[in-house]
Each structure stands twice: as C-alpha cells, then as structure tokens.
Amino acid sequence: MYAIWNIKASDIAAELNRCGTYEERKIISAAEKLGYTCIEENGDMLEAIDPNGDRTIIAEQ
C-alpha cells in the first residue's frame, strides 16, 4: 500500500527543500543524512532519535 507522510521535523523538511508530503523512504533517507538514528514506523508515525539524543516524531501519515 502506498502511503503519504507529512513531515513534522523542520530540519528534514529543509533537507528535502520544502514542507509537504513525501514517501517514507525519502523521509528516512533525509533523516539519516541529518544524523537521526533508530528510525522506525510506529502506527501512523515515523519516530527517531534526533541528533541531540531525543526521541521525536519526524513524520505522520
């Protein structure tokens, strides 16, 4: 199933060059490039550990 995600982390939105909706794999790729770790899908959210070590929601469906 194809799902569209709304980005919640502003640094990831900036990396992708705009706010909006993206496929999961593009968001994960941008997040990894920015230093996010432990990225996982949790229900209708993508969660990760940000570069500061805090757990954060990076995107929602």
Image (cartoon, grey):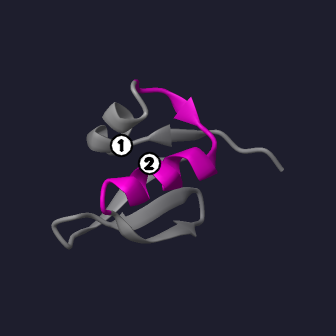
Q: Secondary structure at mark 1?
A: helix
Q: Is residue 24 magenta?
A: yes
Measured from the top left, where is residue 27 in percent x and y?
51, 47
Q: Residue at x 39, y 26 (%)?
A: 17
Above/below status of 9 relative to 21: below
Write the start and end of the magenta stretch as one range.
18-35
Question: Is residue 61 visible to the viewer in this orientation of the structure?
Answer: no
Q: Nearer the viewer, mark 1 or mark 2?
A: 2
The answer to whether residue 42 is seen in the rendering is yes
- Any mark on residue 36, and which? none
Quarter of the image where one finds residue 5: top right
Does the CB distance between marks 1 and 2 fall below 8 Å? yes
Q: Quadrant of residue 57?
A: bottom left
Q: Position of residue 47 (x, y in %)?
A: 43, 64
Residue drawn at x 56%, y 45% is 26
Disc 1 designates what residue?
12
Q: Residue furthest right?
A: 1
Indicate the amino acid at tag 1: Ile
Tag 2: amino acid: Ala
Query: Quick check: 1 above or below 40?
Result: above
Question: What's the mark number on residue 30?
Answer: 2
- Please give the name of the residue rendered at 15% of the width and 67% of the height, measured from the top-left corner: 52
In the image: residue 6, left or right of residue 25: left
Q: Residue at x 41, y 60 (%)?
A: 32
Most extreme residue toward the left is 52
